Image (spheres, grey):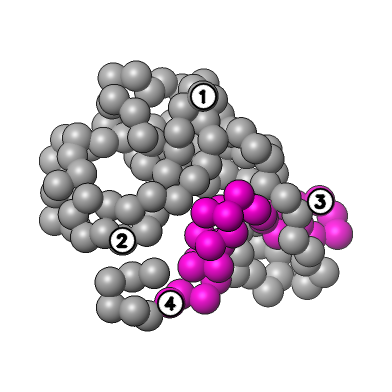
């Protein structure tokens, strides 16, 4: 939840599920995956969406090492932000590792952490 107590229903529900070890994504009848909140599939427009369990591990497909952060992450630097492939969906988050230890192909677990700067909840990845 953000520092002002306001919840973003779709995003905070996803963070709650990830924190509980019950991560999920939305899957349409045609097998396309997307992240909540969604009312229709962004690939085919199907409104027939159901929750599917997020795979236990993912693989880093791209990343950036941040040394000069935005003000809301100033105390977190240096850190790595990565896009991780979980099969049907990709998630973006902060990798909890030394910036030099992250590379394309790194296998990670997904979790929820907090920023050092503002105590905001964020998606984090923990290398295996």
Residue 128's mark? Answer: 1
How packed mark 3 is, by other alpha carbons closer than 10 Å (few <14, some 14-19, many 20 or more), is few
**Location of residue 55 in the rendering, given as x and y in whole percent from the top left corner:** 68, 40
Q: Which residues are magenta?
A: 7-33
**Which is more foreground, mark 2 or mark 3?**
2
Q: Earlier in the sequence, mark 1 or mark 3?
A: 3
Magenta-span inclusion, residue 19 = yes
**Residue at left 55%, top 29%?**
59
* Vertical order, 24 against 58 (above or below): below
**Location of residue 21 in the rendering, given as x and y in whole percent from the top left corner:** 60, 49
Magenta-span inclusion, residue 30 = yes
**Quarter assignment of residue 87:** top right
Is residue 110 something that shows in the picture? yes
**Quarter assignment of residue 41:** bottom right
**Which is more foreground, mark 3 or mark 4?**
4
In the rendered image, the quadrant that contains the N terminus is bottom left
Residue receiving disc 3: 31
Q: CA distance from mark 1 to mark 3?
A: 28 Å
Q: Earlier in the sequence, mark 2 or mark 3?
A: 3
């Amino acid at each position: 939840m953000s520092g002002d107590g306001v919840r973003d229903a779709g995003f905070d529900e996803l963070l709650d599920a990830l924190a509980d070890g019950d991560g999920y994504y939305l899957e349409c009848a045609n097998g396309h995956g997307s992240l909540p909140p969604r009312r229709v599939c962004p690939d085919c427009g199907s409104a027939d969406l159901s929750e599917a369990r997020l795979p236990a591990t993912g693989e880093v497909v791209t990343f950036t090492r941040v040394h000069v952060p935005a003000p809301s992450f100033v105390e977190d630097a240096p850190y790595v932000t990565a896009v991780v492939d979980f099969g049907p969906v990709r998630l973006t988050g902060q990798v909890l590792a030394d910036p030099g230890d992250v590379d394309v192909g790194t296998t990670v677990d997904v979790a929820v952490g907090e920023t050092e700067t503002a105590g905001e909840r964020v998606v984090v990845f923990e290398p295996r």
